[in-house]
Image (cartoon, rainbow, N blue to C red):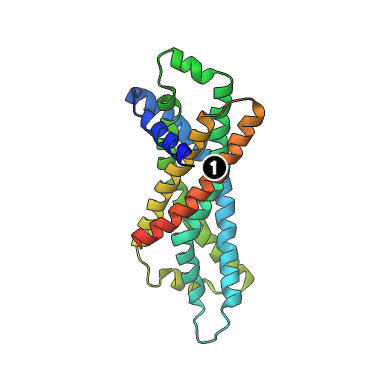
Amino acid sequence: MLQHFGKYLIFMKSLFARAESSKVIFNRTIDEAILIGINSIFIVAIVSTFIGAVTCVQTSYNLVNALIPRSTIGYMVREMTILELAPTITSIVLAGKVGSNIAGGLGTMQITEQVDALEVMGINSASYLVLPKIVAAMLVFPMLVIISMFLSIAGGYLAGTITGEITAQEYITGIRDDFIPYNVVFALIKAEVFAFLIASISSFRGYYTSGGALEVGAASTTAVTNSVIAVLIADFVCAQLLL
């Protein structure tokens, strides 16, 4: 484990050794941002909407005390969404989609000797292939988390009003009650941390793939597993440090 961690740190250092020109990195970062961010909007939208809807319905189910106002449902949906569900669940979903894609792509390039070809041409393959992915992930993850927040709260609103669990006015009152702007900042900080971990770990696993097609599949699976574990650990650390 320590050997892999040390190798990971050396890998991260190599990203900035003989780095490519800023123009090349910028152009590749835009391409990666489209692949990572734009192509993930649909799955994020579906997951976020139904998470908000389920949170609203289950909170209503457990709210049996007549002395607690129904607007508490909206308050709980907002707090759970912003603090935990939007940044963490979205990142776990993206770890499966984006992480496996990054690891599989780099692993395929490695076993087909495309990475070696870049090195022969004098290009720092780690910087050229990996750095734009990490930068792009750190750019688009917070945007996806903001979309997730909005759609989760909207999903809770639709689920609550359609099922009759809560009126529209009660829900809006709840999501406005005791709002703390710092919670949104906290969620975006977590999104940045998660983006770095998912992109870098997946790239590391894919970059050092050796063998054939079976090893590429194993690298993708390992990348997703390691990324999810890293996200959960980082979630706890961020909560301890920042709240």
Q: Quadrant of residue 113?
A: top right
Please tell me which residue lies in front, 96 or 210: 210
Q: Position of residue 162 (x, y in %)?
A: 62, 68
Q: Quadrant of residue 7?
A: top left
Q: Position of residue 87 (x, y in %)?
A: 47, 54
Quadrant of the image for the C terminus? bottom left
Marker count (numbered): 1
Relative side of 214 to 238, left or right: right
92, above or below 158, in the image? above
- Work out whether residue 19 can be spotted: yes
Q: Secondary structure at mark 1?
A: helix
Q: Position of residue 227 (x, y in %)?
A: 51, 45
Q: Residue furthest bottom?
A: 67
- Work out whether residue 41 can be spotted: no
- Name the residue rendered at 35%, 66% in the picture: 180
Residue of label 1: 40
Please tell me which residue lies in front, 204 or 53: 204
Q: Position of residue 174 (x, y in %)?
A: 45, 72
- Name the residue rendered at 51%, 29% in the picture: 207
- Name the residue rendered at 39%, 56% in the picture: 238
- Circle 1 Cα neighbour tier, 10 Å, few/some/many (<14 / 14–19 / ≥20): some
33, above or below 72, in the image? above
Q: Residue furthest top?
A: 121
**Disc 1 residue type (three-letter):** Ser
